[in-house]
Amino acid sequence: MADVPVMRTEVPGFPCRRGKVRDVYDLGGELVIVATDRLSAFDWVMPTPIPGKGRILTAMTLFWLGRLGVPNHLLSADLADLPAAFRDRPEVFAGRSMLVRKTAVVPVECVARGYLAGSGWKEYRASQTVCGLPLPPGLAEAGRLPEPIFTPATKAEEGHDENIPFDRMAAAVGADTAAELRDRTLEVYRRAAGYAESRGIILADTKLEWGRLRSGELILIDEVLTPDSSRFWPQETYRPGASPPSFDKQFVRDWLETTGWDKASPPPELPPEVVEKTAAKYREALERLTRE
């Protein structure tokens, strides 16, 4: 399937909720999640798509769901199982669409960290904690933590998610649910990190989302262990003490920082070389992790 960039999808007759990078269609009893080629950076959706990005993220999610065997919302990734309005446009929907079960989404981002980076590093420098968890002194940026930690965050429709203490999560969703999600998130992280290491990749951290079925069962939902929800670093260039290069939109962020863009007005179009370098990083992550 050729990588014709898909910024926005339209399917008449089905309500659609648009996130920063995904279009979610309500079929009544199920949902269809469509990963577009939109890319967000600094809380803005870029005006330029990254060709193939949506298919790469979908392929990675399907790979991890199959490998992990964790109860999840996936029903099918086969276009033949979708309504005719989707089947009739394979150039748009093939390879980037998942038919999934509806759940009551747990309103907390479940983050597992094995390394000190991003907002965790900023908090550590200020208070020697991450999400209120005390950490040993003397850790370096991008340094490996003694043990993986669970650092929940609020789910923000717009703007940044906010890191919160575990007690605040427990107050929001209940102590038993919070404890179960902490334990299951850390288990997924450890298993995924171990596999990624065997492929020459460091999984520094990841963000998982969970939902509850009517039966009460908590299952994994949304994208899983992709470069948009995780921090992947190549082992061969990893050095603690500085932020390593990663398999994601780093080229976009770096380029934007050179443009004088104020991050408060619509962002500029991305130049072709930035688009291609970003697309290449996503492809490399898929190839190295899945051998596809």
Image (cartoon, grey):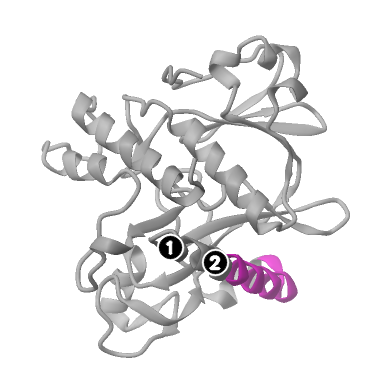
The mark found on residue 69 in the picture is: none
| Cα distance in 3D space between marks 1 and 2 | 8 Å
First in sequence, mark 1 or 2: give its number: 2
In front here: 256 or 56?
A: 56
Q: CB atoms at circles 1 and 2 under 8 Å apart?
A: yes
Q: Residue visible at 25% across and 36% down? A: 277
Q: How many marks?
A: 2
**Amino acid carrying mark 1 in the image:** Leu
Residue 166 spot, x, y in % from top left: 56, 75
Q: Quadrant of residue 31?
A: top right
Residue 36 can be seen in this image? yes
Please, what is the dominant secondary structure of the magenta stretch? helix
Label 2 residue SS: helix
Residue 55 x/y as whole percent? 51, 31
Q: Residue at x 47, y 61 (%)?
A: 196
Residue behind mark 2: 189
Q: Which residue is mark 1?
A: 203
In magenta segment, residue 104: no
* Residue sitting at the far right: 215
In the foreground, 267 or 222: 222
Q: Residue furthest front?
A: 291
- Judge left or right: residue 93 versus residue 205: right
The stretch of residues the image draws in magenta is: 173-188
- Name the residue located 67 percent from the left edge and 75 percent from the top edge: 179
